[in-house]
Amino acid sequence: MELEKELEFFKSQYKELIAHYENQFVLIEGSRLLGSFTTDSEAYEAGLEQVGNKPFLIKKVIKGKDIDQAPALMLGLLNADL
Amino acid sequence: MPIYDGEFRTQTGQPGPGGLLQAGPVLPLEIAIPSALSKFLSTQNQQIPAPRSGFALIDTGATRSCVDSQVISSLGVNSIGVTTLGTAKGRSQHYLYPAKFRFPAIKFEVEFGSVVGVDLSGQGAGNMQIIALIGRDVLSRCILIYHGTKGSFSLAL
């Protein structure tokens, strides 16, 4: 799975990250923290500069889990026959 | 404020609900690589991929805008994260991608830090291939008027 290593690193370092970077966007490549940023766009630009156009993780450091909703899509109702 | 007016008519040219009911509120869309990636590719003397054209469906049920994974991947954009989509059917993991949405009909574009990559293959009505969903992240900055009986809608961005 793409970004698996980065997500594992984020999970393992979560306590440290939340203590220092709460509500910021962290940039991670492999098992390296490359920086923290105010916006995801800033983090993306920094990622391109430091890593190039390769997969890297940008994640907002927040308490709790962030879950998005797209019920029509996930229930297959975008194109339902009526 | 640019305004897109969508209207569906019957075969006799009269306003009616059928077209909008079937297709939903859709508008022409181009998906392009993020500006930061364009700049990066330019500095590397690499070719900038042409935007992909299709249609966007306005989805008031979606918290965040979504893009077809195959379309965004074909532009050479790498994922920058993973999110969980929650529904009544359960939860599933999806990749996040930075992207730029262009609305050529109203000469307007939106740059996203991230959108959710989903499988939209085969979605759409007739020749209108849906390649993105406009979620409430965009709609929170817009005015949307849906006139179901007339078969029209307006989106002020």
Image (cartoon, coloured by chain):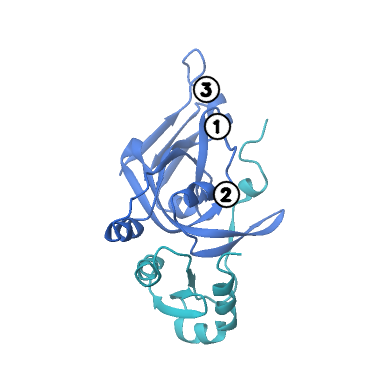
Instruction: Tell me the kind of residue under disc 3.
Output: Gly
User: Within the image, what quadrant is residue A64 found in?
Assistant: bottom right
Instruction: Tell me the kind of residue under disc 2.
Output: Gly
The quarter of the rendered structure image containing the N terminus of chain B is: top left
Residue at 53%, 45% in the rendered image: B59
What color is chain B drawn in? Answer: blue
Q: Position of residue B3 (x, y in %)?
A: 35, 39
> Disc 2 or disc 1, which is closer to the eye?
1
Task: Name the residue furthest front.
Answer: B45
**Location of mark 3 (residue):** B16
N-terminal of the two: label 3 or label 2?
A: 3
Q: CA distance from mark 1 to mark 3?
A: 13 Å
Q: Chain of mark 2?
A: B
**Location of mark 2 (residue):** B61
Q: Residues within 10 Å of mark 3 (few under 14, many from 20)?
A: some
| SS for dot 2 | loop
Q: Residues within 10 Å of mark 1 (few under 14, many from 20)?
A: some
Q: CA distance from mark 3 to mark 2?
A: 24 Å
Look at the picture and state if B62 lies above or below A9: above
* Contact? badges 2 and 1 (CB < 8 Å): no
* Residue B26 appearing in the image: yes
Q: Position of residue A18 (x, y in %)?
A: 51, 83
Q: Nearer the viewer, residue A27 or B60?
A: A27
